[in-house]
Image: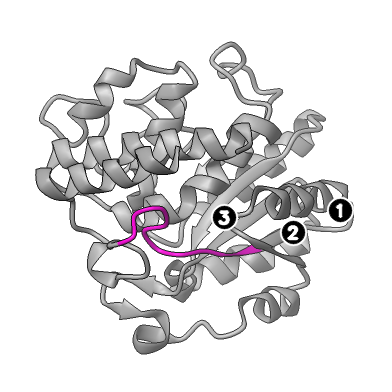
Amino acid sequence: MTKLEQKALELREWIIRSLASAGSGHPGGSLSAIDILTTLYYQEMDISVENYDQKDRDHFILSKGHAAPALYTVLADKGFFPKEELLDLRKFGCHLQGHPDRIKTKGVDSSSGSLGQGLSIANGLALAQRLDGIQKKVYILIGDGELQEGQVWEAAMTAAHYKLSNVIAFVDNNGLQIDGTNDEVMGVKDIGQKFAAFNWNVLTADGHDFDSLTAAIKEAKAQEKGPTVIVCQTTKGKGVSFMEDQVGWHGKAPSSEEAEKALAELKEAL
């Protein structure tokens, strides 16, 4: 087992613990996205507690803000706040709200939760970097169901028009959203072809394979003629057998018994 694989399993445990403690939240999309976040925060991005207050660093936007438990576990593990606070998720008075708030939680680069807005924010950060002469990247994670929002495509057109090669987007393509499959609700069909039509560089990756993700990110970083999207094939609820590919786990926290079962599976995998 590689260090990234081990870290992702450890982070999955904290996601389950925090959601079970909260009694509400979104396990499915948090678990489908955590391998992408692990690759970025533990291998690729220049973001740390030490440089967080500086402009000359990479930025990360969690556009699918309901996957906040995934981001919070990473930030706690990286030292932005104590891990014990993860157990106060969604509780009155805690800074770890149901969706990320950059004012309340250090390490969060953008408040999110209203789907469709993240890419516009990423474009603004990327343009600011260009004006400041900063040679860093803006990474953004978008949900596949989120692609049903029109603002995403306005922002996609903007990023291509301004040739924002410092924007690297990931699509968490798990095929499910709160009301069912993407195809049932509003089919997004071939995501790569859509972005290609907007003049984006398009790459694909297995969103749970660290070698695949690493190779795609390396290629994306080398692009100089415009923004890049990495369409990541993922599984909702990845890592917990009874949650995997089940739409019902989009926004339902595990009970204490279900959490124990999930944690036992994850410990066995470790």
The answer for how far apart the CA atoms under marks 2 and 1 are is 7 Å
Q: Quadrant of the C terminus?
A: top left
Q: Is residue 48 above or below residue 180?
A: above
Q: Is residue 216 above or below residue 102?
A: below
Q: Is residue 236 magenta?
A: yes
Image-quadrant location for residue 64:
bottom left
Q: Which residues are magenta?
A: 231-241
Q: Are marks 2 and 1 in contact (CB under 8 Å)?
A: yes
Residue 261 location, x and y as percent?
21, 48
Q: Is residue 246 above or below residue 57?
A: below
- Is residue 86 something that shows in the picture? yes
Please name the amino acid that badge 2 sits on.
Answer: Thr
Please name the amino acid that badge 3 sits on.
Answer: His
Please name the amino acid that badge 1 sits on.
Answer: Gln
Q: Secondary structure at mark 2?
A: strand
Which sits earlier in the primary sequence, circle 2 or circle 1? 1
Q: Which of 195/13 is in front?
A: 13
Q: Residue at x 29, y 71 (%)?
A: 247
Q: Secondary structure at mark 3?
A: loop
Q: Which residue is mark 1?
A: 223
Q: Which of 265/104 is in front?
A: 265
